[in-house]
Image (spheres, rainbow, N blue to C red):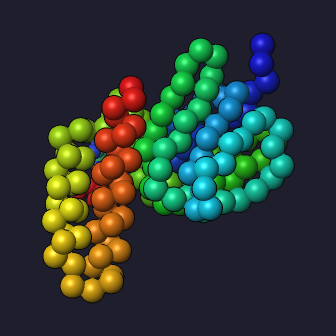
Amino acid sequence: MAETIELEIVTPERLVVKDRAESVQIPGRGGYLGILPGHAPLISELAVGEITYKHGSATTRLSVAWGFAEVLPEKITILAETAELAADIDVPRAEAALARAQQRIKEAEDSAAYEEAAAALARAETRLAVAKQQ
Ligand code: ATP
């Protein structure tokens, strides 16, 4: 059996994943990180993106936004502001959020409003992309 690493993904609301994985992909602020068991310790800020992990023949996908990942050789802990498993993503809700964000980007009158709308757009796009891959 392949070696595995423990993976916990938590949000302020709940424990979303407690599992083991042979490999995990995390959206760090500086780009995607690929983590295997025994990885050197690190802490990374999370961007908006997709977490993918493999366990046996199963590949699990989640949409996450902001937070931190702590990597230790035997355990990865993700503290995310939001995280949804692909199966839990409400597609019509994300489509509505996407349309609202696109409208807000068009109407943004300052850079703060633009940044906020762009972040909402990224969350909605990621949720739709993750839900589609199920
Ligand atoms: P919305 O405008 O639809 O609320 P949002 O991007 O502003 O979208 P967030 O602030 O990122 O939403 O998330 C608020 C909470 O709702 C979080 O718990 C998040 O996991 C959940 N959530 C947001 N959108 C979805 C979705 N499409 N499917 C399932 N859960 C969602």
* Observer able to see residue 10: yes
Instruction: Tell me which residue sits at (60%, 56%) in the image.
Output: 31
Q: Residue furthest bottom?
A: 110
**Residue 45, position as x, y percentages in the image:** 60, 62
Residue displayed at 78% across by 13% down: 1
Q: Quadrant of residue 9?
A: top right
Please indicate whether residue 54 sits to the left or right of residue 99 in the image: right
Q: Nearer the viewer, residue 47 or 102?
A: 102
Quadrant of image for the C terminus: top left
111 sits to left or right of 42: left
Residue farthest to the front? 106
The x, y position of residue 56, in whole percent, is: 64, 16
**Vertical placement of residue 130 versus 31, above or below:** above
How many numbered marks appear? 0
Q: Residue 93: percent from the left, percent from the top?
A: 20, 45
Locate residue 81, reporting x and y percent. 45, 58
In the image, 114 versus 60, the foreground residue is 114
Which is nearer the eye, 108 or 22? 108
Quick check: 132 above or below 13?
above
Can I make out residue 68 in this image?
A: no
Using the image, determine if residue 95 lies above or below residue 58: below
- Name the residue rendered at 20%, 46% in the picture: 95
Q: Residue at the spot x=43%, y=44% of the render?
A: 63
Judge from the rendering whether residue 74 lies leftward or rightward of residue 61; answer left or right: right
The image quadrant that residue 76 belongs to is top right
